[in-house]
Amino acid sequence: MPKITELFAFIVADQNEEDEGVITFKSGDEWVPMLGTDMKRIESLRPIADTIAYQMGKSYRVIRFQAVGEVEFNSPPVPIDGLKFKIERHGGQNGEGTDDTAKDREPGEGGP
């Protein structure tokens, strides 16, 4: 995976040009922001943005953000005083009943 040095976003103004937001669309139960790290991804999202803009009766802009520096870097969590991590992941694709539950797993004992 290449390093992300810029981010593109589909932006729409709400009531005036000072009130903007990232366009989102619903995929299943989740809202997905219309973002991409390269123009290939932006072009793949453009038909969705066109449809949403038409339905809203608004125009949109594609804005490019460039990485200037890191704001924060988070390392994986470290257990405190021997606490154990509890990892639970339920559900599968197409209704498969997978259950990858790792209860009371010591850190470093592998994952699901």
Image: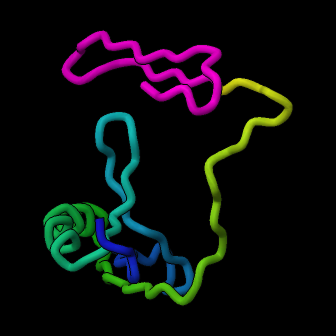
Q: Looking at the image, which residue is at 29% across and 79% down?
A: 59
Q: Is residue 78 left or right of residue 39?
A: right
The quarter of the picture where the C terminus appears is top left
Could you tell me residue 61's position as x and y percent? Answer: 32, 83
In magenta segment, residue 101: yes
* Vertical placement of residue 29 versus 72, above or below: above
Q: Which residues are magenta?
A: 86-112
Locate residue 57, reporting x and y percent.
Answer: 28, 70
Residue at the right extreme of this rendering: 81
Q: Is residue 33 above or below residue 110?
A: below
Locate residue 37: give its quadrant. bottom left
- From this viewpoint, which residue is outermost toward the top? 97
Q: Say if 81 sits above or below 97 in the image.
A: below
Query: In the image, 38: left or right of 111?
Result: left
- Residue 78 at x, y percent in the picture: 72, 42
Q: As drawn, is 92 to the left or to the right of 82?
A: left
Q: Position of residue 50 (x, y in %)?
A: 18, 69
Q: Is residue 30 magenta?
A: no
Residue 75 location, quadrant = bottom right
Q: Nearer the viewer, residue 26 or 70?
A: 70
Residue 55, by quadrant, is: bottom left
Return the residue nearer the eye: 53 or 42. 42
Which residue is rendered at x = 23% and y = 24% of the image?
Answer: 93
Quadrant position of the N terminus in the picture: bottom left
Q: Looking at the image, how many numbered discs can be counted on the residues?
A: 0
Of 23 and 93, the residue lying toward us: 93
How has the structure been colored for display? rainbow
Name the foreground residue: 39 vs 47.
39
* x 38%, y 75%: residue: 4
Q: Residue at x 50, y 76 (%)?
A: 20
Is residue 77 toward the left or the right of residue 2 in the image?
A: right
